[in-house]
Amino acid sequence: QVQLVESGGGLVQPGGSLTLSCAASTTRFAINGMGWYHQAPGKERALVAAITSGGTSTVADSVKGRFSITRDNAKNTITLQMNTLKPDDTGVYYCAASYDYTLSNFDFWGQGTQVTVSS
């Protein structure tokens, strides 16, 4: 079983920054794929960024240049650095994980953390 604990959401003004963190715990196998998804109000969940334990990563085109993802394998933690935030970045951000080396197909999900970008 995998447990994911997200932190770092909140209210920020347009142009501001936020850092989201997700800590994973597992009682069985190693967690190799981890990522962040964004669900805007009234829209489907969409991949923002993902990274494997080997360091391979991807970032959605819509946030490229503004968001970055990093990983600490020793702590099973990923961090999403969000800069130059826009109102469209508002929504719930979910952490996801997999035992597989995947950047898009995750089996375990966190509860989500709210990010609101507003003046």
Image: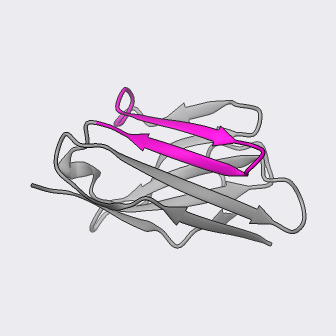
Q: Is residue 102 left or right of residue 80?
A: right
Q: Is residue 47 left or right of residue 4?
A: left
Q: Is residue 64 magenta?
A: yes
Residue at (79%, 49%) from the top-left corner? 100
Percent position of residue 16, x then y: 23, 43
79 relative to 2, above or below: above
Percent position of residue 60, x then y: 44, 37
Residue at (25%, 36%) from the top-left corner? 84
104 or 118: nearer the viewer? 118
Residue at (64%, 59%) from the top-left corner? 23
Q: Going by the picture, which residue comes out furthest to the top? A: 65
Percent position of residue 24, x then y: 69, 60
Q: Quadrant of residue 103?
A: top right
Percent position of residue 116, x then y: 25, 60
Q: Going by the picture, which residue comes out furthest to the left? A: 119
Q: Is residue 117 left or right of residue 73?
A: left
60 relative to 119, above or below: above
56 or 71: nearer the viewer? 71
Q: Is residue 96 magenta?
A: no
Which span of residues is magenta-colored? 62-83
Which quadrant, please, contains the N terminus?
A: bottom right
Q: Is residue 26 left or right of residue 64?
A: right
Residue at (39%, 30%) from the top-left corner? 64
Q: Quadrant of residue 4?
A: bottom right
26 or 46: nearer the viewer? 26
Q: Going by the picture, which residue comes out furthest to the right? A: 28
